[in-house]
Image (spheres, rainbow, N blue to C red):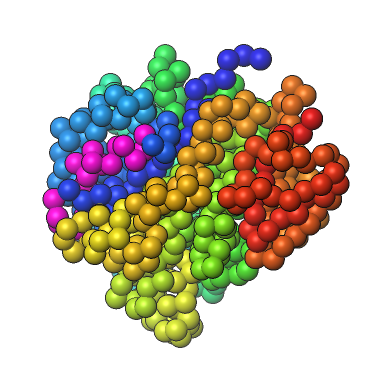
Amino acid sequence: RPAAPWWTSAVVYQIYPRSFQDSDGDGIGDLRGVLQRIDHLVELGVDVVWFSPVYRSPQDDNGYDISDYQDVDPIFGSLADLDEVVAALHARGMRVVMDLVVNHTSDEHPWFVESRGSKDNPKRDWYWWRSARPGFDGGAPGAEPTNWGSFFSGPTWEYDEATDQYYLHLFSRKQPDLNWENPEVREAVYAMMRWWIDRGIDGFRMDVINLISKVVAADGSLEDGPVADGRYGDLFPHSVNGPRLHEFLQEMHREVFDGRRDTLLLVGETPGATVHDGKLFTDPARHELDMIFTFEHMGLDHGPGGRFDRRPLDLLDLKATLSRWQTGLQAAGWNALYWENHDQPRIVSRFGDDGLYRRESATMLATVLHLHRGTPYVYQGEELGMTNAHFAALADYRDIESLRFADEAGRLGHLTDEQILDGLTFGSRDNARTPVQWDATPGAGFTTGKPWLSINPNHETVNADAERRDAASVFHHYRRLIALRHDDDVVRHGDFELILADDPHVYAFTRSLDGRSLAVFANFTGDPRTVPVSFTATSDALVIGNYPDAPSSDSDTVSLRPWEAVVYRVT
Ligand code: ISL
């Protein structure tokens, strides 16, 4: 077997700087705050830290709207602070991955300011400017060039009176889409990426990277999408996995990564990607990306209304989906494994039980994820078993996506106020963005000031101090799982096979490499479950479990307590 790339044995930790650690009492996390918490990362044992954006930004979408790619926003510190953080992480043996947001910029980026200046500005074509729909006056109702609905509610087009044209924004109106058809745009992005690599960073997490190529007709026009909700058309058919996507990624590879490939980690965020797309992105022979974040498993508890529309998870769907990705990328390609990030509600509140069985279900979910084949990502606070926010009022929310959803739903009147709040309680991105709970003090050890988003009151019991003191905690379980990956090549490289495929309550699979196997059993319910096995599960064959005392099993069954997960070495 050829030597595997370093990132196949790595575990990545995501920092959302705004909510990680505040060092100056303004209630917003910052880079000097990260310096105070490096020991936490070392203790956890992660290999890579990915930073959500710290670039200069008006913060319309908490930094995913960038106005200067080569500077740090003052709320987070300075470029010198970032250099210090990178050096400190490198000194402790960790690599640093930066978020790369190049599907769009801020509307306050100098490129866009120039572009909107006049129709004949040299940068006009750096963005998607289009005139009103034929027969309509610019700005009139229904005059948008296409019917697409934005990820953040409302239309994807903003009318600019000065030049009587619209610009495209798949996200907020302060996030105009860059026109990747224009080679000058691509060269400017590549130059910026080279600048960061030369500065010493170790890779990129590429935000919505499969949205950069749009379907454009020969005459330059864009087309309407199918209408499902009676109001806006679906942007996916014309904006996701577009015709030139793989060409652009291969060009980026040649222009930016060639020759420095071995030390970098390249992970793409790719909503709507199928397993087939996943192979195209991550087959090393194609020179595109190392791994991608897929969304299929994260949509399984969404109803037709999307992320704010809760539907109970059917475990059979989760098993089928994850195993399809596992086996689909087995021969060539690689999975990024995640339950959480800054866009997803907390997993223990979603697929687990954040009340009575918080510890058990959080550690069960961690065991399942970390025993898959791929590179696991841990989102800040996930390793502490942090839960959803359970905010009481709309006024508690800060996230633009949540606020725009509430606003539009309120205006259309198809949901009651209570339904809107329920939707946010379940699906808001703010669930993952509450400050990290370091200790039981009023500011949770996060800030001495007023936090930008309310701290979860359960920080009095759920916090890093308490987790560290308890050997059976979520934190120590994550630590053990990360160490297991580092120590065990079956965990890293073993082939995945689903077993007990039809069991609706227990997720079970094996991982096998060179005649050695691990068997994983996980109870996704709060009731005891017993499943048949075809091997002898003795206690000395137990590799890891999530209950402090030994699980019970005999020669032909494994019995699982509520939310119990066990991993056996099978001979
Ligand atoms: O679920 C989605 C598509 O099915 C969306 O969540 C979408 O993929 C996601 O919002 C994209 O997220 C990324 O880009 C956004 C930013 O707001 C997110 O924080 C970021 O992770 C725009 O930059």
543 inside magenta stretch: no
Say which residue appears at 25% left-offset and 49% top-offset.
21
Q: Nearer the viewer, residue 285 or 321?
A: 321
Q: What is the count of numbered marks?
A: 0
x, y percent for residue 168: 36, 54
* Span of residues in magenta: 24-42
Q: Quick check: can you spot residue 84?
A: yes
Q: Nearer the viewer, residue 546 or 80?
A: 546
From the viewer's perspective, is 344 left or right of 313?
Answer: left
From the viewer's perspective, is 537 left or right of 88?
Answer: right
Say which residue appears at 51% left-offset and 68% top-offset.
355
Q: Tell me if residue 531 comes above or below residue 534 in the rendering.
A: below
> Which of the 4 image quarters holds residue 374?
top right
Q: Quick check: can you spot residue 49?
A: no
Q: Nearer the viewer, residue 164 or 539?
A: 539
Say which residue appears at 25% left-offset and 61% top-offset.
441
From the viewer's perspective, is 540 left or right of 8?
Answer: right
Q: Tell me if residue 519 comes above or below residue 148 in the rendering.
A: above
x, y percent for residue 533: 83, 46
Q: Tell me if residue 231 comes above or below residue 92 in the rendering.
A: below
x, y percent for residue 513: 72, 26
> Which of the 4 image quarters holds residue 372?
top right
From the viewer's perspective, is 133 left or right of 454?
Answer: right
Say which residue appears at 62% left-offset and 46% top-offset.
545
